[in-house]
Amino acid sequence: MVFLIFSLVFLLQFSDKSFLPSSVFKLILVNNTSVSFKTSSRGEDSKPPLTSSGRTEDVYHRNSDPVMKLGESCDPDHSVLRVYMYELPPEFHFGLLGWKGSGNQTWPDVSNPSQIPPYPGGLNLQHSIEYWLTLDLVSSNSLEMVRSCSAIRVLDSSRADIIFVPFFASVSYNRYSKLRGKEKVSVNRMLQNKLVEFLKGRKEWKRSGGKDHLIVAHHPNSMLVARRKLGTAMFVLADFGRYPVEIANIQKDVIAPYKHLVKTIPADKSAPFEGRPILVYFQGAIYRKDGGVIRQELYYLLKDEKDVHFTFGSVQAHGINQAGQGMGSSKFCLNIAGDTPSSNRLFDAIASHCVPVVISDEIELPFEDVLDYSEFCIFVRASDAVKKGYVLNLLRGISRDKWTGMWERLKQIARHFEYQYPSQPGDSVDMIWEAVSRKMSSVQLTANRKNRYRRSQLLVKRT
C-alpha cells in the first residue's frame, strides 16, 4: 500500500501537468521528522546533511544556491547576504601586505592566485579573518571562481543587507602599531583615524548610524583607537575579553573562529581511541595574566602525571608541527583561558580531532546558535578545574564509546572551521556570512520595533 501511494505521488508530481502544488513535495521525512527544504535558485532541493543523532545539521544555504559554477554568477536576489563593500584604497587592506596595484587598481586579480599577496605566517595567521572575507567578496562577481554563494557583492549600497568595511585591522596592529623612523603617529593609529573620518562622512553610515556596517577586528588589540567611535557597527571578533559590553556584545556582534595553525588531519587518517596514547595534552604559554593565571595552577597539578603532556611551547623551533603531532596523538586537549577568554588552541584541537576540554568561564564560541559544542567538547568550570584530581578523574571516567562518539562528531564539524579560498559551502567563511545574516535579522527586528510609533507620527504630521 505504501509503495502504491508513493508511486502515485511520484507520477502526479513529475507528469507534464501536475495535479498537486510543488510545495507539497518539499516535506521529506527524516527519521520520522518532517523537514522542509527550501528550493534553490535552480529549482533543486538543497538538503542539509544529517548528524549522527538524526537531526538536521547546521542551518546554512537555505535561501541560496550552494555553489557558484564555472561560467555562472551568484544571483544577488537568492543569496543569503547582499554585501556592499567600500572601495577603500589599498593602504587599508592588501597594501598592508606589500601589494601594489597598477594605476588606480584597488583589488588584486583574484582569478590569478599568483597575484594574490599571501598573509603573514606564524601567529599572525590566526587572526587572518579579514583577509578571507575580503577575498571572498572580491571574487563573488567573478565567472572564473567556484565558490559558495552565501554572500554576494552588490555595487549599489541601497540594495545591500550589510556594508562591509575592508580594513585589515589585525595586520595593521601586528605590523604597523609601533613608531618607525621619524613617525610621530603610527601607521596603525593613522589608518584608524582616517577610517573613522571616512565612515562618519558616508551617507551609508549616516543612514543607519553604522548599525548595518560590518568591521572585522579579530585581534583583541586591533581597532583600539577607533572601536568606541565605531561601536554601533557589527564587529567580527575572537571574543569580548577586551571590550566593554556597550561596545561589543553577543546581541549584535559575531564571534569567528581563529584560523588554526596545525595541519588538518583527514578524517580517514585520524587516530582512534587506541591510537592516542596521551590522555591530556597542552603545549603553550603557561604564565599568563588576568584569567590566564589558571594555566600555572593546572600546570603544577598535572605536569607529573604519566599520561599527561603539559609543557611550555611556542611557534619557534617547529613548535606548531610538534603541537599538531601531539594533539593528533591525544584523546583530550586542554583549552585554558589565557590573556583573553579564547585562544587558537581550541581550533587546533578540532583540526586534530582531539576532544577539546574547555576551561574558560567567559568564552564565547563561534556559530553556537547552530552548533551544539557539548557534542564534541568537555566544559569544566575554572573553580572545579583547580581542585586536585578533578580534571583527571573526569576525563578518565569517560568511556571509550563516549569518547568515540565525540571524536566522530569532531570529524563531521571540522570543516566548519576551515578558512579557504575560494570559499566552499559550510567552511568558516561561509559560516561567518550565515552568522552575519542571522544577526542582521535580529538587528532589523529591533529597528523595526523602534520605528512602530515614529513612522505613524510622521504620517500624522504629513496629513
Image (spheres, rainbow, N blue to C red):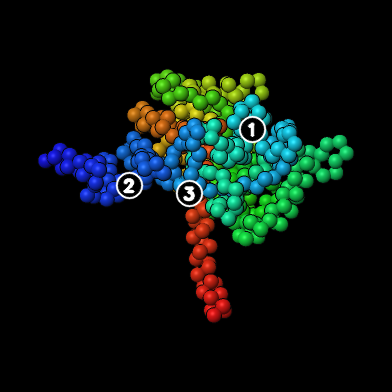
Q: Quadrant of the C terminus?
A: bottom right
Identity of the residue drawn at 30% across and 46% down: 26
* Mark 2 crowdedness (10 Å alpha carbons): few <14, some 14-19, many ≥20: some
Question: Above or below — where is 453 with respect to 9?
Answer: below
Locate residue 387, reporting x and y percent: 50, 38
Front position in the image: 334 or 342: 342
For the residue marked with disc 2, what is the amino acid? Ser
Query: Front-most of 352 and 129?
Result: 129
What's the residue type where badge 1 is placed? Asp
Q: Which residue is mark 1?
A: 109
Q: Are marks 2 and 1 in contact (CB under 8 Å)?
A: no
Give the class, few, some or many, for how many residues have Cα within 10 Å of label 3's Cα (few <14, many ≥20).
few
Q: Taking 441 as reference, is 189 above or below it?
A: above
Write the residue at 60% across / 37% down: 135
Q: Earlier in the sequence, mark 2 or mark 1?
A: 2
In the displayed structure, does residue 69 sit left or right of residue 178? left
329 left or right, relative to 207: left
Which residue bears the numbered disc 3?
Answer: 77
Q: Secondary structure at mark 3?
A: helix
What is the tally of numbered marks visible in this picture? 3
Q: Quick one: SS at disc 1?
A: loop
Q: Is residue 296 left or right of residue 274?
A: right
Q: Name the mark on residue 164.
A: none
Single out the mark in the foreground, 2 or 1: 1
Q: Which disc is residue 36 wearing?
A: 2
Residue at point 75%, 49% (across, down): 194
Percent position of residue 62, x then y:
41, 45
Spot occupied by residue 45 in the image (x, y as percentages of width and height): 35, 41
* Disc 2 versus disc 3: nearer the observer: 3
**Amino acid bearing label 3:** Asp
Pick whichever of labels 2 and 3 is earlier in the sequence. Answer: 2
